[in-house]
Image (cartoon, rainbow, N blue to C red):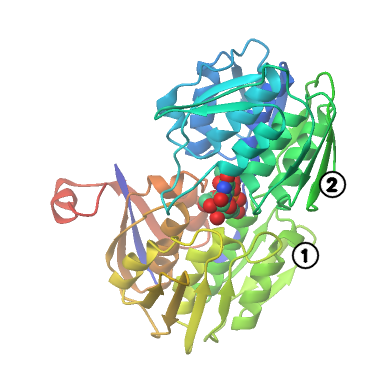
Amino acid sequence: MDKLVIDGGVPLRGSVDVSAMKNAALPIIYASILVAGKCRLENLPDISDITISFEILRGMGATITRVDDTTIEIDTENLVGSTSDKDLVGRMRASYYLLGAELGRFGKSHVGYPGGCDFGVRPIDYHIKGFEALGGEVTTDSEYITISAPLGVRGNGVYFDGISVGATINVMLAAVLAKGITTIDNAAKEPHVVDVANFLNTCGARITGAGTDMIKIRGVEKLHGCTYAIIPDMIEAGTFMIAAAATNGHIKINNVIPKHLEAIAAKLEEMGAEVEMLDDAVIVTGGETYRKTNIKTMPYPGFPTDLHPQMAPLLSIADGVSNIKETIWPERFRYVKELRLMGANISVNEDTATATIKGVGSLHPARVRAVDLRAGFAVLIAALMTAGETEIFDIKYIERGYEDIVKKLTGLGAHIKKVPVTPDDMNGMSQKIG
Ligand code: EPU
């Protein structure tokens, strides 16, 4: 077990390259099951959720060969459905894409329950409703979700009661090889939904409308292999933008799609940072002081829930009282306890899923935990902007979704190191390290 030790208060300066988007790369890896052949995937991030996905697919008979640091070849021809390892599947959220991909290729699926970051209930009822509309009969027990389609997978109209990235992608996966036409109404419009559709279309699928709230999928007989490069991670880019502002730094963030960053850029500018968009990069210059603001998380193109926790430390040093209303994951406030240990003044109204953050001028160092992926980066931003030595435990959550974080931050001038947790840490933090 390792911890991060950060000697903060140093403005971030220089340039950093954004890795590929985790939440696009993961479903594309599972989508390769539908190809039943070889694909070359480029620009993959080296993070633990990707490594676990490779383990799951290798265990099912896929051959995965590393070409270079960011490229793999995956051959799913001999993959056997319904054989995924339940424990590995339970270590990450995106493993639920096995359901749609297996149903699409084999007409049935048998998969353990997905895991992932724990910030409240994460239902999959929309996914199940979508599979049923396509002819799937779904049964669940305490360990497995099982789907069969005795009459085959057939295209149909699917309407979602709420907007779900996962359910939209999963139904797309189940529908590309189905007989007939599937329409998904009230579909998620996130860039990762578009990227998965683009990957599938490059393999011969016929999907139109991805990026709008109505997606149409004309089933095809089979897919063929392709070479595909994953889009850059807008959440990683947004996280660095916030870190630049919070440390009063000046950084150029390379390999971005500026259009994806409009919501976060608008908020940072409103607070007093300078944001300059280039063709495939963004430059953020911090301000000496920041104005309060209010944030409401929304599906794309609204303010992303996956950048909510990272904004809390910045709002903690703004003038006045700010609010963050969380509309996607109402319990995503576990970072609050950790930021309070650093002196933040944050209260949470659970009924309205709103955090109220009173600006306190500055925070102080502490020993804190990364309680989930984005919450982990929230305390990391707090540590970077705070003079003195902060220690962050449970960093496996940060490593689940951010690539090479020590190297990237060191390149921006941060004083950060990853060191093993000591027996003293274990005693002192026994209530905290888990
Ligand atoms: N929902 C349902 N029923 C469902 C599915 C979703 O009620 O069957 C609700 C959820 O409870 C939530 C909302 O719909 O309130 C949106 O959930 P969504 O399905 O969009 O989330 P997801 O697909 O499980 C992905 C990302 C999350 C990100 C959300 C929202 C992956 C692996 N995860 O989750 O990423 O927060 O979309 O954009 O793609 C992260 O990267 O830190 C992360 C949590």
x and y percent of residue 273 in the render? 61, 79
User: How crowded is the residue under tag 1: few (<14 C-alpha within 10 Å), some, or many (20+)?
Assistant: some
Judging from the image, what secondary structure is the residue with disc 2 in?
loop
> Which marked residue is nearer to the observer: mark 1 or mark 2?
2
Q: Give the CA separation, mark 1 to mark 2.
A: 27 Å
Residue placed most toward the observer, 111 or 308: 111
Q: Amino acid at mark 1?
A: Leu
Q: Secondary structure at mark 1?
A: loop
Name the residue at 71% across, 62% down.
301
Can residue 373 be seen in the rendering of this structure? yes
Q: Return the residue at label 1.
A: 278
In this rendering, is residue 310 above or below 172? below
Taking the spot 41% from the left edge, 52% from the top edge, the residue there is: 372
Amino acid carrying label 2: it is Gly
In the image, farthest residue toward the bottom: 320
Mark seen at residue 209: 2
